[in-house]
């Protein structure tokens, strides 16, 4: 099959494209750097010509509220219109667990707007909502840091490795559309503050993590349901401590 991966040069897109090529499929990694721009429409028609499946793992270049919303709405409309014109038979998108539970977070609102566009379209679809990636733990810690103190919510959290996200997307790609949501989480539950603490210890970073029920997560206060999947999610296989152990030694010594 010809499969187009929107955002195909990023973290998830690169891993996913590799997995699909290993299975013998023709994969087109579509991104501005490869001449495909979902905002302007440049290169979309050519990239989608004869494509059977389109997987959208593109991310907004900005996490600010209005730019993120503008990106996902404009990109979503242009992409879905191009898919209809090309006769795509399965639209797949990567989203986030909790998009419908954290309206205070502008980025989550933007992802929910993208989901709504897909749901309203007539193309058969599957949306994979994944929990936060292990790879973003450093950013979460830095955004919550004040000098030597890192304030993080004690809310429950079930993060997942990007390798597991790419594997789940590859499985979904080769299956039938569900015309709904699939959730993916990691194999272990943590509190968010424990997640940050484990990371700093592995990085040999002396900063102290403080559990704070009012600490905000990208603008939102959390409870134990905010970032957790519902019943019966897919589960990844990579444990956080195993992922940490695979980080390059130089990265761990430098603490970044």
Image (cartoon, helix red, strand yellow):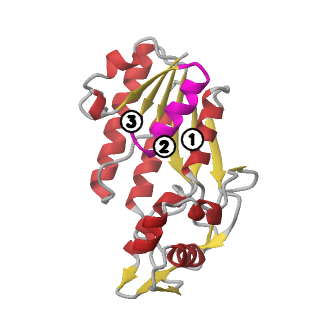
**Tag of residue 12:** 2
Residue at x 41%, y 77% (from the top left corner): 144
Front residue of 150/81: it is 150
- Dot 3 alpha-carbon crowd within 10 angstroms: few under 14, some 14 to 19, many 20 or more: many
Separation of residues labelled 1 and 3 (CA atoms): 21 Å
Q: In the image as oriented, which residue stretches furthest toward the front?
A: 249
The percent coordinates of residue 3 (x first, y second) are 50, 22
Q: Which residue is mark 3?
A: 76
The percent coordinates of residue 88 (x first, y second) are 49, 18
Whether residue 242 appears in this view of the structure is yes
Q: Horizontal placement of 115 versus 23: left or right?
A: left
- Look at the numbered disc 3 and give the secondary structure of its residue: helix
Task: Residue 65: name its quadrant.
Answer: bottom left
Question: Is residue 23 shown in magenta?
Answer: yes
- Look at the numbered disc 2 and give the secondary structure of its residue: helix
- Dot 1 alpha-carbon crowd within 10 angstroms: few under 14, some 14 to 19, many 20 or more: many
The percent coordinates of residue 194 (x first, y second) are 60, 77
The percent coordinates of residue 46 (x first, y second) are 33, 15
Separation of residues labelled 2 and 3 (CA atoms): 18 Å
Separation of residues labelled 1 and 2 (CA atoms): 6 Å
Whether residue 124 appears in this view of the structure is no
Q: Is residue 158 above or below residue 195?
A: above
Quarter of the image where the N terminus is located: top right
Q: Are marks 1 and 2 in contact (CB under 8 Å)?
A: yes
Q: Which residue is mark 1?
A: 166
Magenta residues: mostly which secondary structure?
helix
| Chain part drawn in magenta | 7-25
Q: Horizontal placement of 178 versus 248: left or right?
A: right
């Amino acid at each position: 099959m010809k499969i187009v991966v929107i955002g195909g040069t990023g973290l998830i897109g690169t891993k996913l494209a590799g997995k699909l090529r290993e299975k013998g499929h023709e994969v087109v990694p579509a991104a501005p750097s490869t001449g495909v721009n979902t905002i302007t429409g440049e290169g979309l028609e050519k990239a989608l010509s004869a494509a059977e499946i389109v997987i959208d793992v593109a991310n907004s270049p900005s996490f600010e509220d209005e730019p993120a919303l503008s990106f996902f709405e404009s990109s979503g409309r242009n992409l879905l219109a191009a898919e209809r014109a090309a006769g795509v038979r399965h639209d797949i998108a990567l989203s986030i667990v909790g998009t419908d539970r954290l309206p205070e977070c502008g980025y989550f609102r933007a992802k929910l707007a993208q989901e709504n566009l897909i749901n309203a379209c007539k193309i058969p679809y599957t949306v994979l909502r994944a929990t936060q990636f292990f790879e973003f733990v450093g950013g979460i810690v830095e955004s919550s840091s004040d000098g030597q103190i890192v304030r993080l919510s004690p809310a429950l959290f079930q993060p997942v490795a990007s390798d597991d996200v790419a594997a789940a997307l590859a499985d979904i790609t080769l299956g039938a559309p569900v015309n709904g949501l699939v959730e993916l989480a990691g194999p272990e539950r943590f509190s968010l503050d424990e997640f940050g603490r484990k990371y700093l210890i592995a990085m040999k970073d002396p900063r102290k993590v403080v559990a704070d029920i009012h600490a905000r997560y990208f603008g939102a206060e959390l409870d134990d349901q905010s970032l957790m999947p519902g019943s019966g999610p897919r589960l990844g296989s990579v444990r956080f401590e195993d992922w940490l152990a695979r980080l390059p030694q130089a990265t761990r010594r430098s603490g970044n």
